[in-house]
């Protein structure tokens, strides 16, 4: 087994879905399953492709493919997004459904949770209708046994009519059993006879009317009974996909139209409306899943564990979350201080050497200024400030994810979000935003309702990303924890930072409530959130994926924005008009507005120029205050003196922190909103909403501050 990069461009496609093959004989296998059943872990174990896997639902929002070989076949497994049903509502469920139906897979492997088989078999039974060559993989067998659940694989295989294998994703022996059965299935040695889904009598009668007409069109391309049920279900987007796949217009076929009308009239006579039909179908599938389990599983009563009773309780849930937040930030601050200082000296020293090298080679002064004093120095600051805390924060975040604590946070926050008429899943996307707002915005695909998805995207910026953490932390350390040294100082900084984060969460809830009562009116939708079992974290994988998937990705994005921004800033600071730099005219023009909201023109300019990357706001302000044409290294003690000499007080510092928390997203996040929401008007709203909130908040802080200071 192993991942191969070779590709000859062969494809098996349905609609717009394509899979690359290494040879025409490769077998395409769809890997499907509910979120959080270990599907991607099984996929990774077979292929060696270290795809990012998370211990909470909704992580995978696109397909991934790999390659592995057995003694008999070469396989192309495709890891599709986790879904609970083929009756898709969200974007990720549509990806899973469309690949199963139209992706040209030779067989399907449905990974199920042996600790909760009824829910998992709900999806397996639906896939078996579309793809008879299905292998059911009952994963997490070790956890099932620990809970006193004893699966009877042979009996379950008989009930389902397809091959079943029990696995523990980290046990190679069980994975070998999986590949052996997969070989036999693909070789035709195992002939599946999938259990047929049965529905209540009116639905069965409606299917009997419609199926013969549909069969004449679908032939062997799609199961006629299943296609007829989709037509009855009246999912217009999926019907269009079926028509595109078959190359015919079902809606224009007179026989199908007449049969469909007859079937719908029959359902109406039995008081089954379009909405009730969906509910009846789901209920019937669940009953079929329970019947299929039969005596194959001897289960124990499911109750909350002692840990969950504490972590999700109304009394202790939120205090524990807050204390854990302080702990994560404290470790990040303590661990990042020395590496940041060391990296800063190293990078700025390298910048001095590069500058001297350009002088010796007689490079034009303007070119040296743009490249070294502008682009390089700003880039060096961003790397020195961002890299150490990210290299600590992201692994800690991944550790909580692997342990299974993030779903508990989402569970605790579900009630507040629902009270704001938003979706509880927004808690998950908000958590993702703490790493990168652009990633959090993309993660909003897991929310079914477009209205709630838009609310989540427009408010994700209130979760301060790793680009704003250093800025907020710097101001806290310089102004509010300056006199506290050592461990005590870092604890004070961490506690204050946690308070700021809580303020961001409250802002998210408040703005979500306002949006749901105004431009995005509606009722909150319900959703099922699984509390996965606590698992032993895999430290090696945590470090690998947190450093590669998150730290390097976010740092690369910031660096790509910081270098060009540095060049532009150098030009503004060094190109003169009327005897003064252009930058000074901009700061002077913005100064009255800046004073009104408790800051000054320099800070407003720095925030605006920091649109490409928030990490450069503080260094820009320092450069402007020092009236230097280039950014230079500056210690925290010097920063305090510099800022106070330019009129800063504790009120100014509070306003800067507040505006750092609530202002327009970075350029990358705005572009992501435009792409995900489908238009510039939503990107404009994503810019305007937090900025207005920040301006109002700062104006209030400044007004109250003037009362206390008398300034």
Image (cartoon, rainbow, N blue to C red):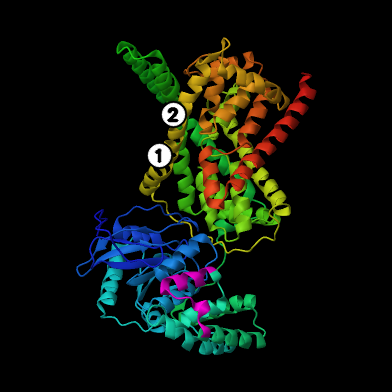
Closer to the camera in the image, 415 or 627:
627
Q: Is residue 68 left or right of residue 141?
A: left
Q: Which residue is mark 1?
A: 552
Q: Which residues are magenta?
A: 237-254
Observer-side mark, 1 or 2, equals: 2
Task: Look at the picture and state if 224 lies above or below 8.
Answer: below
Q: Quadrant of residue 592?
A: top right
Q: Residue at x 55, y 52 (%)?
A: 678
Q: Position of residue 15 (x, y in %)?
A: 41, 66
Q: Is residue 470 magenta?
A: no
The kind of secondary structure element at disc 2 is helix
- In this rendering, does residue 503 appear at all? no
Place residue 264 in its image quadrant: bottom right
Spot the residue most to the left: 71
Answer left or right for 661 relative to 151: right
**Residue 250 forms part of the magenta stretch:** yes
Q: Residue at x 51, y 72 (%)?
A: 239
Q: Is residue 438 visible?
A: yes
Q: Residues within 10 Å of mark 2 (few under 14, many from 20)?
A: many
Compared to residue 20, the image places residue 486 above or below, namely above
Query: Is 72 or 224 nearer to us in this picture?
Result: 224
The answer to whether residue 27 is left or right of residue 624 is left
The picture places residue 377, in percent across and down from the top left corner, at 43, 22
- The residue to which callout 2 is attached is 563
Up-down relation of residue 493 to residue 151 (above or below) = above
């Amino acid at each position: 087994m192993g991942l191969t990069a070779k590709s000859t461009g062969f494809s098996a496609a349905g609609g717009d879905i394509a899979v690359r093959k290494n040879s025409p004989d490769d077998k395409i296998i769809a890997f499907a399953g509910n979120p959080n059943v270990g599907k991607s872990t099984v996929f990774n174990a077979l292929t060696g492709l270290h795809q990012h896997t998370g211990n909470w639902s909704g992580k995978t929002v696109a397909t991934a493919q790999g390659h592995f070989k057995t003694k008999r076949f070469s396989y192309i497994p495709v890891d599709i997004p986790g879904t609970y049903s083929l009756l898709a509502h969200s974007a990720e469920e549509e990806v899973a459904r469309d690949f199963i139906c139209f992706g040209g897979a030779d067989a399907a492997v449905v990974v199920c949770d042996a600790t909760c088989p009824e829910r998992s078999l709900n999806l397996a039974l639906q896939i078996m209708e579309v793809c008879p060559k299905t292998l059911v993989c009952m994963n997490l067998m070790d956890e099932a046994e620990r809970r006193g659940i004893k699966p009877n694989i042979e009996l379950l295989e008989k009930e389902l009519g397809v091959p079943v294998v029990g696995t523990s994703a980290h046990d190679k022996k069980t994975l070998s059993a999986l590949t052996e059965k997969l070989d036999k299935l693909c070789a035709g040695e195992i002939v599946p006879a999938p259990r047929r889904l049965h529905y209540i009598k009116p639905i069965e009668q409606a299917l009997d009317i419609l199926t013969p007409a549909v069969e004449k069109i679908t032939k062997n391309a799609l199961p006629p009974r299943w296609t007829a049920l989709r037509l009855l279900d009246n999912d217009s987007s999926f019907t269009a996909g079926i028509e595109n796949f078959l190359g015919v217009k079902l809606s224009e076929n007179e026989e199908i139209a007449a049969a469909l009308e007859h079937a719908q009239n029959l359902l109406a006579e039995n008081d089954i409306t379009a909405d009730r039909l969906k509910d009846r179908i789901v209920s019937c599938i669940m009953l079929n899943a329970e019947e299929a389990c039969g005596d194959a599983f001897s289960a124990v009563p499911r109750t909350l564990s002692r840990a969950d009773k504490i972590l999700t309780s109304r009394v202790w849930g939120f205090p524990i979350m807050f204390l854990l937040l302080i702990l994560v930030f404290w470790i990040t601050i303590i661990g990042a201080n020395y590496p940041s200082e060391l990296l800063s000296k190293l990078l700025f020293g390298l910048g001095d050497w590069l500058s001297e090298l350009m002088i010796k080679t007689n490079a034009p002064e303007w070119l040296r200024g743009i490249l070294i004093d502008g682009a390089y120095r700003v880039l060096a600051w961003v790397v020195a400030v961002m890299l150490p805390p990210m290299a600590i924060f992201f692994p800690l975040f991944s550790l909580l994810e692997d342990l299974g604590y993030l779903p508990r946070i989402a569970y605790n926050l579900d009630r507040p979000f629902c009270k704001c008429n938003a979706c509880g899943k927004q808690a998950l996307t908000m958590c993702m935003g703490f790493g990168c707002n652009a990633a959090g915005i993309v993660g909003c695909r897991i929310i079914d309702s477009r209205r709630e998805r838009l609310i989540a995207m427009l408010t994700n910026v209130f979760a301060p990303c790793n680009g704003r953490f250093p800025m907020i932390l710097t101001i806290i350390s310089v102004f509010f924890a300056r006199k506290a040294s050592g461990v005590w100082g870092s604890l004070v900084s961490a506690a204050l930072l946690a308070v700021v984060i809580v303020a961001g969460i409250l802002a998210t809830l408040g703005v979500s409530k306002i949006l749901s009562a105004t431009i995005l009116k509606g009722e909150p939708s319900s959703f099922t959130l699984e509390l996965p079992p606590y698992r032993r974290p895999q430290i090696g994988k945590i470090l690998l994926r947190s450093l590669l998937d998150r730290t390097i990705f976010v740092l690369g994005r910031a660096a790509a924005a910081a270098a060009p921004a540095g060049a532009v800033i150098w030009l503004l600071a060094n190109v003169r008009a009327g005897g003064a730099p252009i930058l000074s005219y901009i700061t002077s023009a913005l100064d009255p507005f800046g004073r009104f909201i408790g800051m000054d023109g320099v800070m407003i300019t720095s925030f605006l120029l920091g649109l490409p990357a928030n990490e450069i706001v503080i260094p820009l302000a320092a450069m402007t205050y020092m009236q230097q044409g280039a950014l230079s290294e500056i210690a925290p003690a010097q920063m305090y003196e510099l800022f106070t000499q330019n009129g800063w007080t504790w009120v100014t510092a509070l306003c800067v922190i507040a505006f750092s928390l609530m202002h327009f997203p970075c350029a990358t996040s705005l572009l992501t909103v435009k792409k995900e929401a489908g238009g510039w008007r939503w990107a404009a709203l994503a810019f305007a909403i937090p900025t207005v909130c920040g301006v109002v908040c700062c104006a209030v802080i400044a007004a109250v501050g003037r009362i206390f200071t008398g300034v």
